[in-house]
Image (spheres, rainbow, N blue to C red):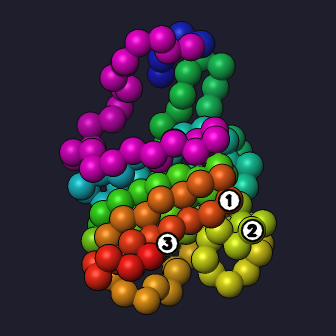
Amino acid sequence: ILKEKQIRTPTKLPGMRTGSFLGVSCGFAHTMLATDQEVLFGCGWNSQGQIGVGDAPTVATASGPVIPKIKRLDVGTVRHVSCGGAHTCVVTQTGGGRTFGANSCAQLGNGKMEDSRQPVVVELDGVATVSACGEEYTFVITEDHTV
């Protein structure tokens, strides 16, 4: 764990030796990193389940970030990950969608408006390739270039 309270220069995080990193995304106060080994890492606030680890408390300490390994989350191989204000969207290699976290504006795309602390499957019209999240919304682009 890093001993500084604030990290002011690019710094390698200890314990991050799991495959190659495919992507990183930051929300208001959480960060998700995807690897090529079917593993997601997350850190930061988990107040609304945006890290996808259930009711785990906020994952950070005053001495630095804690990077818990989130094992597979039943999402398969990750193609893309994006973070909104307090939610996360994962696009799998097969083009499926998984979302978790805040859902007060239906940003998880599951037809409900309750937060989800575990990944939920999102039914898509097509095969997703990339996603983008804002504070309270999510967009997905499919292989045929539709949104």
Q: Is residue 17 above or below residue 49?
A: above
Residue 117 shows in the view: no
For badge 3, the amino acid type reads Arg
How packed mark 1 is, by other alpha carbons closer than 10 Å (few <14, some 14-19, many 20 or more), is some
Indicate left or right for 106 with 144 as reference. Answer: right
Residue denoted by label 2: 105
How packed mark 3 is, by other alpha carbons closer than 10 Å (few <14, some 14-19, many 20 or more), is many
Residue denoted by label 3: 98
Give the prevailing secondary structure in the magenta stretch. loop
Residue 83 shows in the view: yes
Q: For residue 24: magenta?
A: yes
Q: Is residue 24 above or below residue 10?
A: below
Q: Looking at the image, is mark 3 or mark 2 nearer the viewer?
A: 2
Q: CA distance from mark 2 to mark 1?
A: 6 Å
How packed mark 2 is, by other alpha carbons closer than 10 Å (few <14, some 14-19, many 20 or more), is some
Among the two numbered marks 3 and 1 on one chain, the one whose residue lies closer to the N terminus: 3
Q: Residue at x 59, y 13 (%)?
A: 5
Q: Position of residue 88 (x, y in %)?
A: 55, 58
Depth order, front residue of 61/128: 128
Q: Residue at x 35, y 60 (%)?
A: 80
Q: CA distance from mark 3 to mark 2?
A: 17 Å
Residue denoted by label 1: 136
Among the two numbered marks 3 and 2 on one chain, the one whose residue lies closer to the N terminus: 3
